[in-house]
Every structure is written in structure tokens, then in C-alpha cells.
Image (tube, grey):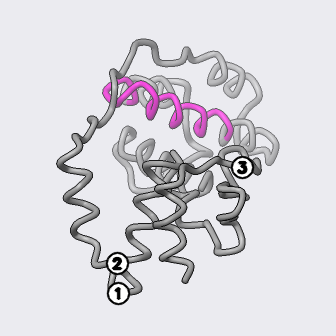
């Protein structure tokens, strides 16, 4: 996931520079400052994620001899973006949740899978990437827990499940 994020951040940085490919060896402090200014037009969390990738690339550029150490020190001193981005997304109401579950046909394998995924997202509060990585062996219906093996920070954790979730997950596992 971090590699995909880094690739996306590098594309964002290239757009801020107005180029297709970042010419690392010819970048100046003015270029880095222009990138930082361009990132200010993005959401604060995403702009800071891009800035973090930019800093890591600058450090690697110094290590391989493409960037000057003094320039990299200046890049590392660029301030983080400040402010709040507000809450992203919105809460969905009960009618929308019911509509999502109703759209899943419990008589088909795909419908049972989709209901299980919605259950893990809702009851288990798993992240999207964690939901799609759940394997049958990760679900313990007897103890009513699901094991998340590669969660955020590559940490393993166990998430308790309510009885209603166990019934839906049992249909999927069958």
C-alpha cells in the first residue's frame, strides 16, 4: 500500500512541477519550494503525505549522489502544511445501509461475499484493505472474532464481532 501511495504522491509532485517525470538531478531549491506551494492547494493530509515522499526521495537522492547535501538539508527544513481538512466523507443513514444489504442477493456466492464484506466494514470496523484480505481461516465464529493479519502498520489484531455479524459471516463461510 505504501508503494502505491508513494507512486501516487510522485505523480502529484510531478503535476505540481508541471512535468511528466521529475528531473531529480536538475532540481533547485526554488523547484522544491514551488512543489511545496503547489501541495498547499491539496488537502492537508494528502499534501503532507506528498511532502513526506518528497523528503524521502531527496534523502535517497543525496545517498546516491544525485542531490547536494546542502540542498537536501533545505528540503528537509520545508515546513509541513498546517490547517485542518475537515471531516472527509459523510455518515450514511440506516436506510442506506439497509439498501446496501438488500442489494446483496443472499442466494448467490457473490451476494453472500458482499454481505460479509459489508458486515466486516460495519460491525468489525475494518479498513477496506483489511476487509479484502480476510481469509476464511481468519474468522473464528465460535469465539466471535476476526483476525486482521496485515492491519495498519503491518500489525496483527483481533476484532470482536457481535452475534448478528457471526450469522452473516457464517453464511459466507458455508
Residue 49 to residue 64: above or below: above
Residue 111: numbered disc: 2
Q: State the residue in front, 99 or 82.
A: 99
Q: Position of residue 116 (x, y in %)?
A: 46, 67
> Which comes before the other along the chain, label 2 or label 3?
2
Residue 132: numbered disc: none
- For the N terminus, the image quarter is bottom right
Q: Secondary structure beneath disc 3?
A: strand
- For the C terminus, the image quarter is bottom right
What residue is shown at x 76% (from left), y 51% (from top)? 156
Is 48 on the left-hand or right-hand side of 84? right
Mark 3 neighbour density, 10 Å: few (under 14) some (14–19) many (20 or more): some
Alpha-carbon distance for marks 3 and 1?
A: 28 Å
Q: Secondary structure beneath disc 2?
A: helix
What residue is shown at x 64% (from left), y 47% (from top)? 160
**Which span is picked out in magenta?**
39-56
Is 103 on the left-hand or right-hand side of 151? left
Asked if the magenta segment contains residue 68, the reply would be: no
Residues under numbered marks 1 and 2 in contact, where contact means CB atoms less than 8 Å apart: yes
Q: Position of residue 149 (x, y in %)?
A: 73, 58
To which residue does mark 1 refer? Answer: 108
Q: State the residue in front, 75 or 131.
A: 131
To which residue does mark 3 refer? Answer: 158
Q: State the residue in front, 52 or 99.
A: 99
Amino acid at each position: 500500500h505504501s508503494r502505491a501511495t508513494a507512486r501516487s504522491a510522485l505523480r502529484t509532485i510531478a503535476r505540481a512541477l508541471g512535468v511528466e517525470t521529475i528531473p531529480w538531478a536538475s532540481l533547485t531549491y526554488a523547484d522544491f519550494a514551488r512543489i511545496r506551494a503547489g501541495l498547499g492547494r491539496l488537502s492537508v493530509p494528502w499534501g503532507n503525505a506528498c511532502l513526506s515522499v518528497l523528503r524521502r526521495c531527496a534523502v535517497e537522492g543525496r545517498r546516491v549522489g544525485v542531490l547536494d547535501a546542502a540542498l537536501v538539508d533545505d528540503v528537509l527544513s520545508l515546513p509541513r502544511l498546517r490547517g485542518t481538512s475537515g471531516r472527509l466523507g459523510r455518515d450514511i443513514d440506516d436506510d442506506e445501509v439497509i439498501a446496501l444489504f438488500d442489494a446483496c442477493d443472499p442466494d448467490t456466492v457473490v451476494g453472500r461475499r458482499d454481505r460479509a464484506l459489508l458486515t466486516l466494514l460495519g460491525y468489525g470496523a475494518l479498513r477496506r484493505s483489511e476487509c479484502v484480505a480476510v481469509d476464511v481461516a481468519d474468522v473464528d465464529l465460535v469465539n466471535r472474532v476476526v483476525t486482521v493479519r496485515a492491519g495498519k502498520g503491518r500489525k496483527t489484531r483481533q476484532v470482536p464481532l457481535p452475534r448478528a455479524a457471526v450469522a452473516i459471516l457464517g453464511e459466507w463461510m458455508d
